[in-house]
């Protein structure tokens, strides 16, 4: 490899013909990378005729990213994984909705 010391270093984006990056070009590049699998699996959530916050909640549940104590702890945002309601076990999404004695009485 031959280096040319007289040439300036420049950033080049190979995702567009203009070789210039913009947010629009980056977004189009990301969409082109999709294989359609995620839309087939999770796209039904976004097509439901329900409130947007419920769609987002279902998406979080399906992707196991409900902000439970265990999730927050694993992302260095929490101090403890113990359920703050029953204080018996690790609080994950399953425990919040089905395992916690306090939650089960509410359902």
Image (spheres, rainbow, N blue to C red):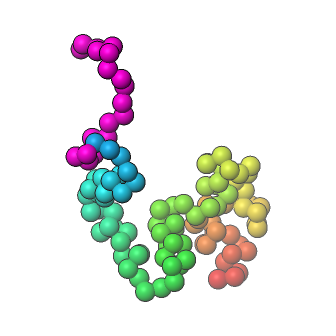
The residue under the point 52% across, 66% down is 60
- Residue 27 in view, yes or no: no
- In this view, the residue in front, 14 or 73, is 14
Residue 79 on image: x %, y %: 74, 49
Q: Quadrant of residue 14?
A: top left
**Residue 49 position (above or below residue 96):** below
**Residue 10 position (above or below residue 53):** above
Magenta run includes residue 59: no
Give the dominant element type of the magenta stretch: helix, strand or loop.
loop
The residue under the point 54% across, 72% down is 57
**Range drawn in magenta:** 1-18
Q: Quadrant of residue 105?
A: bottom right
- In this view, the residue in front, 23 or 67, is 23
Image quadrant for the N terminus?
top left
Residue 66 on image: x %, y %: 58, 64
- In this view, the residue in front, 69 or 97, is 69
Residue 107 on image: x %, y %: 64, 83
The residue under the point 28% across, 14% down is 3
Magenta run includes residue 8: yes
Is residue 4 toward the left or the right of residue 105 in the image? left
Residue 21 on image: x %, y %: 35, 46
The residue under the point 62% across, 66% down is 95
> How many numbered markers are drawn?
0
């Amino acid at each position: 490899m031959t280096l040319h010391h007289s040439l300036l270093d420049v950033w080049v984006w190979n995702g567009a013909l203009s070789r210039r990056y913009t947010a629009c070009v980056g977004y189009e590049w990301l969409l082109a990378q999709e294989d359609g699998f995620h839309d087939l699996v999770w796209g039904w959530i976004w097509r439901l005729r329900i409130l947007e916050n419920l769609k987002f909640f279902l998406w979080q549940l399906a992707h196991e990213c409900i902000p439970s104590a265990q999730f927050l702890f694993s992302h260095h945002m929490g101090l403890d994984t113990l359920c703050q309601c029953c204080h018996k076990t690790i609080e994950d999404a399953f425990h919040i909705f089905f395992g916690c004695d306090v939650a089960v009485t509410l359902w």
